[in-house]
Amino acid sequence: MRIAIIVPVSPQEDLNTLLSSAKWLKNLKFPGEKKILYVFDGSEGDERVKLLKNLRVDVLARNTNRGKRAGAINDGLKALKKFKPDLIAIFDVDSRPEENFLIKCSNLKTDVYIKSTRRYIYNDHSFISKAVSLEYRLINFLLRISAFKQFNGLIGVLNPRFLYKHPLNEDAITEDADFATRMHSLGLKAELAEGRLFEQSPVTVRDFFNQRKRWYYGGLQLWKYFKLVSESRKLSFKLSWISSLTLTFIPVVFLPLIILSLPALLVYRKNEGFKAYAAFIIHCLVLQAAAVSAVISYLRGERVKWVPPKRS
């Protein structure tokens, strides 16, 4: 069995993060043949390209930023056709999956388009990242019970047949949610495996706001699929999809629950309970501001730009 790993790389990504990523992914266990492909927007002359190749991973310099992340993944898929992968894994440069991640996620049923694990934050040292770390625990719970499972960034192991037949939408702000909506509408499934995957959280309020504004904006774009979703035979998927595009836009409604959560946070975080409590309240307010800002930009027809976050 062959697996190909695609890692899209933004023009602003720093060298240390890239080298750390390559060393980590090379150590992932897999019983068959494994190929790791980093896809750059830049040229072959990029110093980062040369240094990555020294680590014996493949690099595709596509000399364009067409389609941003979605375009990079689509171009990576084209470059991998000769390799004929049985599975495709997608990671970001800050993804740190467990050593057995590929093995745990490689057994895909015919109706499963992606399989992944629970997500955790490994840089929860800033005020906002502590709150995001707690938020991820809620997301992990929802991934278990939701009929519409959407793994951020399509980070996981995917069936290449669906990726080649239904390329990522390069006009979508959140190409992962766009693809997940289309796959679920076709009756396919996303499956949660036992295991853990670690990634970085924004460490500043500005980066967090920018990230979530993009996510909210991308959510608004998904309403064009309402007719497609409504034709699905799975009521649980329809309700889950609609809930994810409505309730998430009014996080302040859940603020009373956060206010009542102080005793639990004191037990869970002990000495840092009050910090986590304050951070979670600010987290909720920033989320609401990002949602409102995204709606305004969407109604005005303004595009939301991706802003590179500060790395830890």
Image: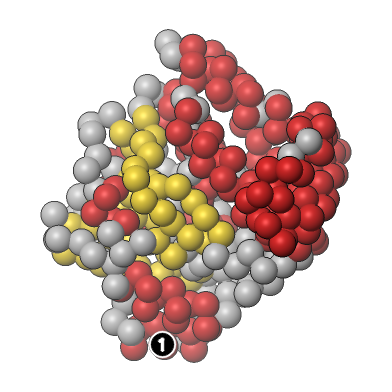
Q: Quickly name the residue at label 1.
A: 50
Q: Position of residue 217 (x, y in %)?
A: 71, 41
> Left or right of 45: which side holds 116?
left
Q: Is residue 3 above or below residue 224?
A: below
Quadrant containing the N terminus is bottom left
Residue 167 % position (x, y): 41, 43
Residue placed most toward the observer, 226 or 41: 226
> Where does the image place residue 62, in percent across and percent down from the top left?
46, 69
Residue sitting at x 49%, y 16%: 236
Given residues 63 and 252, the one toward you in this image is 252
Q: Height in image: 153 above or below 138? A: below
Q: Residue at coordinates 39% horizontally, 23% vertically from top-left?
A: 186
Residue 103 x %, y %: 24, 54
Q: Which residue sits at x=55%, y=23%?
A: 240
Please report the residue visible at 27 percent of the width from the left and 50 percent of the height from the top: 104
Asked if residue 300 can be seen in this view, the reply is: no
Total marks placed: 1
Q: Can residue 54 be seen in the rendering of this structure?
A: yes
Quadrant the C terminus occupies: bottom right
Q: Give whichever of 247, 124 is nearer the camera.
A: 124
Q: Identify which amino acid the numbered label 1 is placed on.
A: Lys
Label 1: which secondary element: helix
Give the colour scheme of this rendering.
Answer: secondary structure
In this image, 142 relative to 286: left or right? left
Near mark 1 (Cα within 10 A), the count class, few <14, some 14-19 or many ≥20, is few
